[in-house]
Amino acid sequence: MLRSAAMQPRAVFAGALLATLASLAGMQAPRYDLLIVRGTVVDGTGAPARRADVAVRQGRIVAVGTVPRGFATETIDATGLVVAPGFIDVHTHADDIAETPGADNFIRMGVTSVVAGNCGGSALDVGDALARIRETGTAVNYATLIGHNTVRRAAMGTANRDATVAELGKMRSLVWRGMADGAVGFSTGLQYVPGSYARAPEILDLARIAGNAGGIYASHIRNEGTELEQAILEAIRVGEVAGCRVQISHLKVDSPSHWGSGARALALIDAARARRVDVQADQYAYTAASSTLSIRFPAWALEGGPAATAARLNDPPTWTRIKTEMGELLRARGLGDLSFAAVASYAPDPSLQGLSMKQIAVRLRGSDSSDAQFEAARELMLRGGASMVYHLMSEQDVGLIMRHPWVGIASDSGVLVPGDGVPHPRGYGNTARVLGEYVRTRRVLRLEEAVRKMTSLPAEHFRFNRRGKVKVGYAADIALFDRVNVADAATFVQPHAFPAGLPYVIVNGVVVVRKGQQTGARPGQVLMGTAIAP
Ligand SMILES: [Zn+2]
């Protein structure tokens, strides 16, 4: 009823009149839970910004346009602010959100929905994990994928070989159960052990199960630099043969020797789309990546888990062979040593956090030679490994990829705890950096296009029903920002800083950030793909 009232001026007038009469009679009841007035609506579709009020009731947007004042429990004056759909971050590692349900780093950058379970790593028991999240309550909406590395490890550990028929059967049943329990798709992390040991037929087989249940296939592809194109083709083939939607995760060119090949990667996506393979990608707005230290080691050296790895690192001839291969892998990427790498998190010695491997080599080995850097990396691996930041990309490729219409924006971050480690700044600043640096300063994107890439584009690809637009009937996930001063504040040196210019964030109609302060509310819902939702 309200929906049609909002669309018909006469009905709005009649409603206003009735409400005025009710008010005169001293029995005024709030008609809206929330009214956002005088803002500039950027609705998420890419359509031009326009002045409009937005009214919210029971978690839904019930009016967009000129809305009569005075009938709302809370009214937000959005003068000078953009009113956008809350940002949907489909590439996160927020799997442990129940431990930090406020998810401050996400909500403070306007993210209202996250997808976890990426890069092949997820909860093994999706039903159990989602039940726990529902019970705890979270500030943001949450969805998860079921991860290939997780199910492969459960079925066959870290064995470096093809799965047997029985092991494949076990993986299939685990993926099927994950989908039945509410996963929105299947993810791979083909640069990580044990996913890197799996060949295409295994992945195809498992992706088909997720696809049959309406799920998406999201892939951290096998190689993001020296063999980028082959890796993209592998992901596309999975979509083509298994018949599922494909999301290429954190698309980038991570090898200086291959900088400039972003155009060829995007052309492969265009060609696949022309064949009706529904492939998209996502990207974060930085020229540095973040990953494990182990990713720099040859995959064979990691088989069998930490004890087996340690045995190889402690066996001098084997270590020499590993070190030689590490050097060869780097040279193929156009790199001479590990100076592009910095430690983000290292529990055995937090004083190393934030230092480059060159600095750490001096600290631990008294030399900054490439050999000393490899020896330092070995030491860190023997003490459990580290989480790293890798400066490996070019602005040219980042900008080119960002301009592509089927590439969305996602952070690749987990839920961060302020002050804990020196993580990649994307977890605090990604969306604000797109709006400040890439829209306002560099003019890589129009504002409306940037918002579309963070809202309706990922919402539709992941099939989040009625989310990602400022539109009547849609969930009231809303971010308010000041297009003039929205900016990321997190840096590689001091990442624990919330962005500026995002004063209000609303999730399912509930204010979670008000005047730049978290309210502590946890209105987030568990999201499931519409094809499998009950
Ligand atoms: Zn990844």
Image (cartoon, helix red, strand yellow):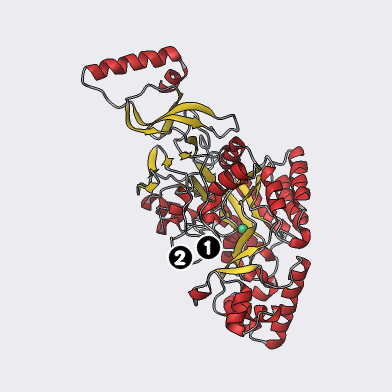
In the rendered image, the vertical position of residue 396 relative to residue 307, given as above or below: above
Q: Quadrant of ligand 1?
A: bottom right
| Numbered badge on residue 423 | 1
Q: Position of residue 337 (x, y in %)?
A: 71, 73
Amino acid type, callout 2: Asp
- Rendered residue at 66%/81% (across/down): 372
Which quadrant: the N terminus? Answer: top left
Q: Are marks 2 and 1 in contact (CB under 8 Å)?
A: yes
Q: Position of residue 110 (x, y in %)?
A: 48, 45
Amino acid type, callout 1: Pro
10 Å crowding of disc 1: few (<14), some (14-19), many (20+): many
Q: Position of residue 322 (x, y in %)?
A: 71, 78
Q: Residue furthest left?
A: 26
Q: Position of residue 183 (x, y in %)?
A: 53, 49
| Numbered badge on residue 420 | 2
In the shown orientation, is residue 53 left or right of residue 429? left
